[in-house]
Image (tube, helix red, strand yellow):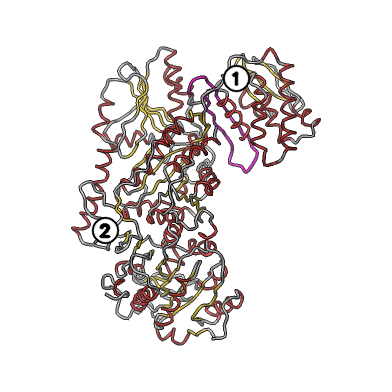
Amino acid sequence: MSPFEEFDGQTPTWCPGCGNWAIGAVVKRALANLRLSPSSVFVSFGIGCSGNMNDFLNAYAVHALHGRAIPVAIGFKLANHKMPVVAIVGDGDCYGEGGNHFLHALRGNHDITVIVHDNSVYGLTTGQSAPTSPKGFRSKSTPDGLIETPLNPLALAISQGGTFVSQAYASRVPQITELIQKAITHKGFSLVNVLQPCVTFNRTNTYDYYDSKVYDLPSSYIPHDQVSALKHAMNMTIKEEFPLGIVYESKRPAFHECLPQLGKQTLLERGQFEGIHEILEHFI
Amino acid sequence: MTTGLNFSKIAARSGFYIFDCFEYPSLIRGGHNTYETIISKDPVYATRNEVDLLVCLNKETFELHKNRLHTDSLVVFDEENFQIPDGDFHKLAIPMKKILREQKGSMVMMNNVALAASLSLLNWPYEEIEKIIIQSFKKKGQNVIDLNARISRMTYDYVTEQYEKHIVHDFLPTKNPEKKVVLTGNDAFSLAAIAADCRFYAAYPMTPASTVLTTMAGLAEKTGMVVRHAEDEISVINTALGASVAGVRSSVGTSGGGFALMTEAVSFAGIGEIPIVIFLSQRPGPATGLPTWTEQGDLLFAVNAGHGEFPKIILAPGDTEEMFALTMRAFDLADTYQTPVIILSDKHLSESTMSIPAITLKLSAKSNSPDRGKRISKAENYLRYAKSADGISPLLIPGAPHSFYQINSYEHEEDGHTTEDAQMRVEQVEKRNKKTQTYLQKDFKMPETHGNMADAEIIFVSWGSNKGAILEAQKVLASKLIKTAFIHFTHVFPMDEKKILPLFEAKKRYILVENNSHGQFGKLLREQTGVVLTEKILKYDGRQLYVEEIVEYVTV
């Protein structure tokens, strides 16, 4: 069995033509390229079409609650910081139900990779509007058109302290693979927001739509300045243009690296604390 | 508050047992704060209504507590601050402000003046104050220590000279007394968690559980524990579950409102079969309620917390010593049954202080080697949710080579994959339910009984922090020749009907005692065992049950 095939779980149940097929294959490819195996990586899944990858990808994993994949991933990382930790989530999952966790994981620069399947719609519940749906989006929950403006995940991530902020597009497989590999290798919080058409429930954000709206960051672009990064991120809101690639990248110690109690040994590896008697003395 | 705790510590160091409680309004600072301590030569579990020594730093203190004075009570105050009328008690005016002014001390130091006056009146040596001052202020430098020591000395001497005839001689310190630790319920939970090898604690601040977070965080570097103050209680428990999945003992703490946010993940821990210890310290609700007061209003909420059906264990300690022992046990039970275990406390237990012989806790910690339950370090074709006779599947820690599995919030097959198959659903439901049966057979502990059940005319039935007031009330009633017994439940959920029923078969007057308005334990007892208790003492004014209220109910 090839390293790639070791990750093969059950056959996916995604709709034919769904971007998840590409992302699912890419995740396995990236993990295999990084010489990881199903025994050496931890994946936290949210609930949604993306989260259903839990059964299709072999790995130590938790299929968490809707919106809660990020805190589960953070907890796992803090207890075993030697294991790479990936969260596979959706846009409603991560930016809606779990929005607060996303914000604070960015602030903490927790060393996890968050791969968002951003299809701008709720697919598993058969078509309601999502946090990244465009204004005016007609869906089962917004039959007269969505009143809210779309959440800008890249701008949010850059402004809240993310240290690796990137965007990919489901039809550009080599680029997603590369970004996911770089994101997992990055020390600190990494975001890969994957623009992903939902062929069944989203008639707006289609392959044709994205084909005409995405752009590659220029080869001269250096992603180390938050203000320039924000300009590209804001193109999504202002011009409806979607940058692809690493929009922002910087070095800042990850949360676990700032804890003196976590070093060569993980929380899991170290021995039991023996000094309880000494602590009791303080209460006499 | 520190001053009150210092007084308690000095009392314990002098050979006495103490119990104290602390009342404060939900304000950032100020308002009417009181610290009440009872000292005794024998173990003591509750304060009393009668006050022997009342130290008033303002007039409100006198007004609010004057009805608790008796003919021998001593009332300490400062005439420069306010006058108090003559009454059937002894007034002891002390020029506190003058001493502070002359020594150029600040008004905050009034607390130490009060402490010095109290020690002087108890005929305890001045040196004890000095020790405490050095301990409290060593970070602030020698000048602060000297100033506080000087002010305390002057007050101490003033009282000794001016009020010699009022000095109490019944509570002289014993020489080389047994060492006692002075702990709140929250301290006891924190220390027991550390002793039990809990390595991960997450919380969001919420009274009255906040001091667990601050204590754990303060000790984290020393203990090697990771403590996360997360963005909300939802993140708190999910983070802790992530750490638990990784294989370390994990715990969270909160009060009712925070626990409400956690309930979704409690259910997840149930189906995912993830060990977790939840410290739930109750305060009066609903909603924001009375944030800094006490109530046992969340028992049935805890019992029913989480959507769907899954096993859960709830332990309710009655005092700090039980808190220590049951917390260590909770971690073993969570690992053994791979399910949520809740330690139910309340403000009164969480923030009141009790002295416990240090050796008791040291032995308890020493004899405890964590029981991590069924664990394996390698497996081929591992089945996380394998069926078993006792409902418990062996646990493989993620990272083990040549293996992998998922923990699933969906219903799952034995290997963790999602399923909607009817037969598999039934098998997994029954597997989880078996854990409850196993627990009842192997680990359910009967309630403690206090007093002679055969002789008693009255049998109190209660749980949690009411224990102290009931034990003290039993002493008072015994002195009035009323024979009582007391059934004190700690393993409150689930309960074993067959084992419990015999306790309620005698033709006695059973009285349910609870600190809530619905009689929640009574309802739970009825649901779990069929026992119906009709006579009830229920209190729900935000204050704990007082000894005198129980005595009065029985005697009047």
Q: With respect to residue B166, does B446 lie above or below?
A: below
Residue B92, magenta (yes or no): no
Q: With respect to residue B421, does B492 lie above or below?
A: above
| Location of residue B136 by image quarter | top right
Q: Chain of mark 1?
A: B
Q: How many marks?
A: 2
Q: Where does label 1 land, which residue?
A: B52
Judging depth in this view, the residue of B429 and B26 nearest the camera is B429
Residues under numbered marks 1 and 2 in contact, where contact means CB atoms less than 8 Å apart: no
Residue type beneath disc 2: Ala
Residue B32, magenta (yes or no): yes
Mark closer to the observer (1, 2)? 2
Segment tinted magenta in the rendering: B15-43
Q: Which mark is residue B379?
A: 2
Q: CA distance from mark 1 to mark 2?
A: 67 Å
User: Residue A183 appears at what percent x and percent y?
Assistant: 46, 72
In the rendered image, which quarter contains the N terminus of chain B? Answer: top right
